[in-house]
Image: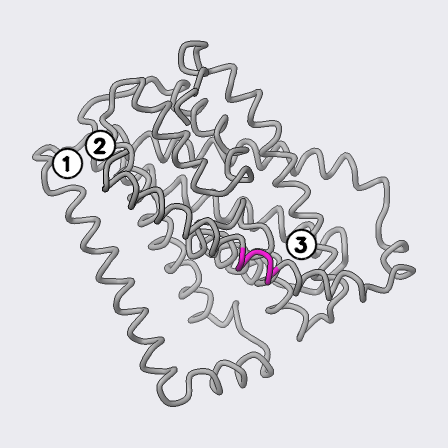
Amino acid sequence: MSGNDTKKSLKKRIIEVLGYLVSGIALYFVYKYVINIDLEAAKQKLSYTWIPLLLVFIAIYIVLMSFLATGWRYMLELLHGSSLPKWRIIGIYTKTQIYKYIPSNLMHVIARIYFATKLGPSKTNVVQSYFLEIVFMVLIGLIIVLTTVYTGSFTLSDELILKFKTALAGGGKVFSYGILIFGVVAIAFYLIKALRNYKSAFSSDNLMRIVKLFVLLVCFFFGMGCVEYFVFSGLLGMDIGFLYVVSLFTITWLGMFIIPGAPGGIGIREFIVIALLSPIYGPDDPTIGILIFRVITVLGDALLLPIGTIFVPEELSEAKEV
């Protein structure tokens, strides 16, 4: 193994360990809320009649993941310079979703790189397509959150605002602004770097790919926000706004990219939802709701494995190098 490979392996290992550490802390936070749930009150709310609805939600999740898969195909085609087999790419994306739980989100990326390069794109293009996917997700996510904040659809509790103000006092404020500025510069730099070598990047076909990508990602965030909204409002009866939940889901989804080594974002998403909602709605309903939502996504990812395998040829399925 070369020195560069050793450094990459060490870096990957450090990210995974940090991801597990953060997930462990977040899960402990969630655990403290779970053990304090009023079980009698929870039993009165939970019902077997929810099962058909949960199955519908899982089906919606599977469809929306195909939106992300198609968006990734557009990015990969833009960088590769030609069209790629639609269902093969969707199959690779959906088949590898389950990999993010074992051992972490990084394995999902590695598996995608392995499979996609078998279809022709270079490893560099596949890696760049992954980061461009994140760039567009972050950009659209920020637009959604900032719009809902500006319109007053998404607000924080007074308790959390006070905590943030305390945390941002003095040097913390400078540090936070520094992180935000660094993030904006990094996104812009990578977007320019990834596209500058492609003379046809802004052809009419590729511009249409980018437009379609934006539409698919917006539909994904609003679609998943809709599912989460029905869990909180429809099943648990929480008096919560639709756009508030869309922003909440967007924030929790982007949280997975902040901690890339966390397996499937487990613990991170739950921590964010409980931290934001419990000061307003109490601890029980947000905790129950996000656990139900986690069941939907995990079962959905499990079903995506055999579904994705249908569209991935046998010669691409033997991922011995992964």
Query: For the residue marked with disc 3, what is the amino acid?
Result: Ile
In x, y percent, where is residue 244?
Answer: 56, 63
In x, y percent, where is residue 22?
Answer: 53, 59
- Residue 253's disc is none
In the displayed structure image, the side of residue 321 where residue 78 appears, left or right: left
Query: For the residue marked with disc 1, what is the amino acid?
Result: Ala
In the displayed structure image, the side of residue 61 where residue 33 appears, left or right: right
In the image, is residue 84 above or below residue 253? above
Q: Quadrant of residue 299?
A: top right
Q: Quadrant of residue 296?
A: top right
Q: What secondary structure is found at the residue carrying circle 3?
A: helix
Nearer-N-terminus badge (2/3): 2
Please report the bounds of the magenta region as a residue range: 21-26
**Quadrant of the rendering where the C terminus is positioned:** top left
Nearer-N-terminus badge (2/1): 2
Residue wearing tag 1: 201
Look at the numbered discs 2 and 1 and tell me whether their residues touch, using CB distance below 8 Å: yes
Gap between marks 2 and 1, in whole Å? 6 Å
In the image, is residue 124 above or below residue 13? above
